[in-house]
Amino acid sequence: MVILIGADVHKSSHTFVAVDAAGKQIGQITVRATHSGHEKAYRSARKSFIEQDRRWGLEDCRHLTGLLERNLLAHGEPVVEVPAKLMARQRAAARTRRKFDPIDALAVARAMAREGDLPAVFTDE
C-alpha cells in the first residue's frame, strides 16, 4: 500500500497530511521549515508507515520547497510536484473555504491520489 503525504509549506513551517490510496486522512504533523524539522517529519512518517511505500507531494513553489525536496530525496523518498491548478480544484471541493494549513496539505495529498501521473522531483547534479 502506498501512503501519500501532502505538504502545505510556508516560510517558517510545513504541515504534512498523510492519506491512504482512497484519500482517507491517516496522519498529520506540523514542523518548522528547517533541516531538523524536515528530519522530524521524515522520521515520523518512517515510524508511522514502516511497512508501506511513501510518496511525498509538494505544491509547486520551489522558493519554499527546495530544502525540503533535497532533504527528502537524500533519504531516498520519492517526491512529486503537484501543480497549483490541481490545488484550486481540490480546495473548491473542500467543506470549508478558509485558508487552513492541514486542509491545504490534505488537498495536496488527495490531488496526488486523484492524479496518478505527477512529475517527479529530482536534484540537479
Image (cartoon, helix red, strand yellow):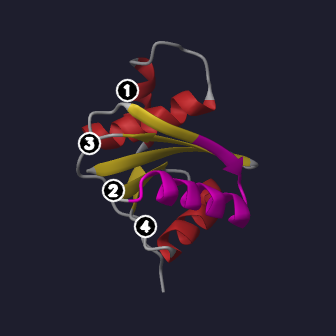
Dot 1 lies on which element? helix
Q: Is residue 47 magenta?
A: yes
Q: Kindly identify which residue carries mark 1.
A: 89
Magenta region: which residues? 29-50
Q: Tell which tag, 1 or 3, sits nearer the viewer.
A: 3
Dot 3 lies on which element? loop
Is residue 20 placed above or below 89 in the rendered structure?
below
Q: At label 3, which amino acid type do we have?
A: Glu
Q: Point out the tag, 4 or 2, that comes first from the N-terminus.
A: 2
Q: Residues within 10 Å of mark 1 (few under 14, many from 20)?
A: few
Q: Tell which tag, 3 or 4, sits nearer the viewer.
A: 4
Q: Say whether residue 85 is visible.
A: no
Q: Kindly identify which residue carries mark 2.
A: 52
Q: At label 2, which amino acid type do we have?
A: Gln
- Marking on residue 77: 4
Dot 2 lies on which element? loop
Q: Tell which tag, 4 or 1, sits nearer the viewer.
A: 4
Cα distance between the residues tagged 1 and 3: 12 Å
Q: Residues within 10 Å of mark 3 (few under 14, many from 20)?
A: few
Q: Kindly identify which residue carries mark 3.
A: 115
Q: Residues within 10 Å of mark 2 (few under 14, many from 20)?
A: few
Is residue 110 placed above or below 37 in the rendered structure?
above
Q: At label 1, which amino acid type do we have?
A: Arg
Dot 4 lies on which element? loop
Q: Is residue 16 magenta?
A: no
Q: At label 4, which amino acid type do we have?
A: Glu
Q: Quarter-wise, where is residue 88 in the image? A: top left
Indicate left or right for 3 with 69 as reference. left
Check whether the beta carbons of the residues at disc 1 and disc 2 lie within 8 A of each other.
no
Q: Point out the tag, 2 or 3, that comes first from the N-terminus.
A: 2
Question: 4 or 118: which is nearer to us?
Answer: 4
